[in-house]
Image (cartoon, rainbow, N blue to C red):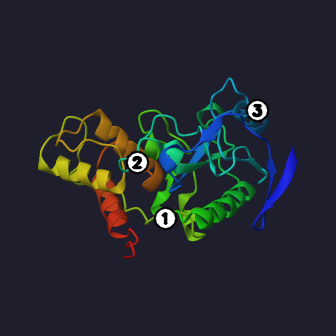
Amino acid sequence: MSAFESDHLRAEVRVSPNSGPRKDGKRPSLLILHYTGMETGEAAESWLANPASEVSAHYIVHEDGRIVQMVPESERAWHAGQSFWKGEADINSSSIGIEIVNGGPLLDFPEYVGAQVDAVIDLCKGIISRHGIRPEGVLAHSDIAPARKIDPGEKFPWPVLYDAGVGHWVTPSPIRGGRFFSIGDQGQPIEALQSMLALYGYGVPIDGVFGKTTELGILAFQRHFRPQKVDGVADLSTIETLHRLLSALPVLSA
């Protein structure tokens, strides 16, 4: 390994062979955060560097805050897999991927630690600045692949990142009683809910039927933006939080 310096941030370099050129001239407009889901950071780093794994990420952030770059930002890392966001299906070509060392379900969802979170924030800030990534373009792996992934999980401190200037966030609406929607419901209110999810970027149908794909979209939304209760039910808290997020989207300059 050798060291390099990017802006004020120091990182190590370990080259992964699992990368290639970005397709169709695409440039990074999304920043995708993952957890490694393995027992140790060393095991995860070795897996990302193994050609047999056919997976990689641009960076891995260890629990002590150490950052290792595995793929140049100019290249297409293989981190997103089958995924979708706002009409884009080749997320690998249009994103930067960061793997954050955390065992996830393998280790009963450990908390993310302070030094690691600080390093993630610093790393994200540099990436956002270099590529002009908008706040709402900082996403969870579960946002872009809700049928397959749950990382970085509901314990990831999105509000801390937002307070530091990374990502998009509003305080979730309080959980309370009232009308809700779930699997099997149909009609115009479901179509309106699906339209809001799709407008934010989620890959859900707009057909007025609350099916499995819509439930997965709600689960992904809750993991990121309403983590207090992740159940796939579109209750008032979930719908209000989604509406407020849409209303709080930064206005595109002309």
From this viewpoint, is residue 155 visible? no
Q: Secondary structure at mark 1?
A: loop
Q: Is residue 197 left or right of residue 147?
A: left
- Give the Cα separation between the discs numbered 2 and 3: 29 Å
Q: Quadrant of residue 218?
A: top left
Label 1 vs 3, first from the N-terminus: 3
Confirm or deny contact between disc 2 and disc 3 (CB under 8 A).
Answer: no
Instruction: Identify the amino acid type marked 3.
Output: Ser
> For the residues marked 1 and 3, what is the alpha-carbon distance in whole angstroms?
31 Å
Residue 134's label in the rendered image is 1
Q: Hey, what amino acid is under mark 1?
A: Arg
Residue 145 marker? none
Going by the picture, which residue comes out furthest to the front? Answer: 25
Residue furthest to the top: 52
Judging by the rendered image, the residue that carries numbered circle 2 is 85
- Judge whether 166 appears above or below 37 on screen: below
Packing grade of label 2 (10 A; few <14, some 14-19, many >=20) is some
In which quarter of the view is residue 20 placed?
top right
Residue corresponding to mark 3: 46
Query: Quick one: SS at disc 2?
Result: loop
In the image, residue 115 above or below residue 152: below
14 vs 51, left or right, is right
What is the x, y in percent for residue 156? 57, 51
Q: What is the residue that sits farthest to the bottom in this orientation?
A: 254
